[in-house]
Amino acid sequence: MKDLIDISELTTSEIDQLIETSCDIMQNPAKYSEKCRGKKLATLFFEPSTRTRLSFEAAMYELGGAVLGFSAADSSSAAKGESVSDTVKTVSCYADIIAMRHPKEGAPRAAAMAASVPIINAGDGGHNHPTQTLADLCTIKKEKGRLDALTIGCCGDLKFGRTVHSLVEAMSRYENIRFIMISPEELRLPEFVKSNIAHHASHEIEETEDLQQVLPELDVLYMTRVQKERFFNEADYIRLKDSYILTPAKLTNAKADLAIMHPLPRVNEISVAVDNDPRACYFKQVLNGKFMRMALIMKLLEVE
């Protein structure tokens, strides 16, 4: 594998291997501190990012490598009209591997065709965010001890949320997964994402608007933000928005070992009072993302 553009490009055995490596990095950081000495990562972020960009940079530094790049399109030659293809051809002369975020779907794939070094998709519009999915899978495995035989609830904006689409695609490859999709009717999971689940005989998928009713059944709850701008009718938004705010009171009947996840940033969909609950895993996801990106960088650079 030369690049990572879409989570579907990874086999389940490759995902399992990356999780295993990330766990070893977490346990033995000194063993990996020189693995990428002399290597350079370029972070080409054509739109703003906090967690993803800093996570890639921290990952490369902790592997002993160096980082160069930009954090906004207007600070690059894209502002002068340079094409993505020319940008990555140029940066390939300076760096050994590139992490790229772009507002246009498909831009990282076009970049991969032009680049002479590995490209990692760090998010392309509403399409894909494979390294966030790797962080999510790593978190589920660490919290639940497995990636099969789970009931996973995805809550909020399931129509436009790229992180949910990627997670469903990845988890649908494991056995006996029950998906419960919790959203207003306006923001239901698209049919093309459901089709990834439907052909798998051991999977179930249910849809509901009632978070409170299904919470006791969940092993994993993946929260996302319900965005006001997605509604045609403000009255519908006002009617539904508080239904998807997770509070300690709503968690009373949830499982003691529920894993509460969120790709971040959050606005108000998880009360800060939930942060002290031992079931809250969203900041663990951030940390797991760094270790998974370390494992991925080594894999793509073919570092043992």
Image: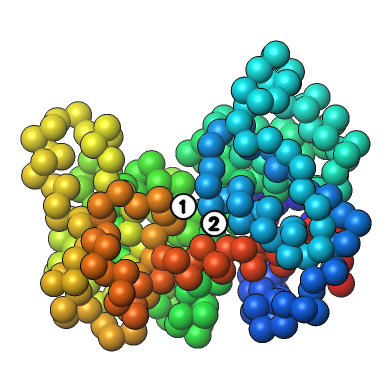
**Nearer to me, 80 or 227:** 80
Q: Quadrant of the N terminus?
A: bottom right
Q: What colour scheme does the image use?
A: rainbow
Residue 235 in picture, x, y percent from top left: 8, 35
Quarter the C terminus occupies: bottom right
The reply to whether the C-beta atoms of the residues labelled 1 and 2 are less than 8 Å apart is: yes
From the viewer's perspective, is residue 189 above or below residue 253?
above
Q: Which residue is mark 1?
A: 163
Q: Which mark is residue 106?
A: none
Q: Is residue 176 above or below residue 68?
A: below
Element carrying mark 2: helix
Q: Residue at x 54, y 59 (%)?
A: 133
Q: Amino acid at mark 1?
A: Thr
* Residue occupying image coordinates x 68% and y 35%: 70
Residue at x-position 23% and y-position 40%: 186
Classify residue 164 by image quadrant.
bottom left
Binning the other alpha carbons within 10 Å of mark 1 as few (below 14), some (14 to 19) or many (20 upward) gives: many
Residue 281 falls in image quadrant: bottom left
Answer left or right for 25 relative to 139: right
Q: Residue at x 67, y 41 (%)?
A: 100
Q: Is residue 18 visible?
A: yes
Question: From the viewer's perspective, is residue 180 above or below residue 150?
Answer: above
Q: Position of residue 211 (x, y in %)?
A: 19, 63
Q: Is residue 170 visible?
A: no
Residue at image mark 2: 132
First along the sequence among labels 1 and 2: 2
- Of residues 40 and 254, the one nearer the viewer is 40
Q: What is the secondary structure assignment of the residue under circle 1?
A: helix
x, y (%) of residue 137?
Answer: 53, 68
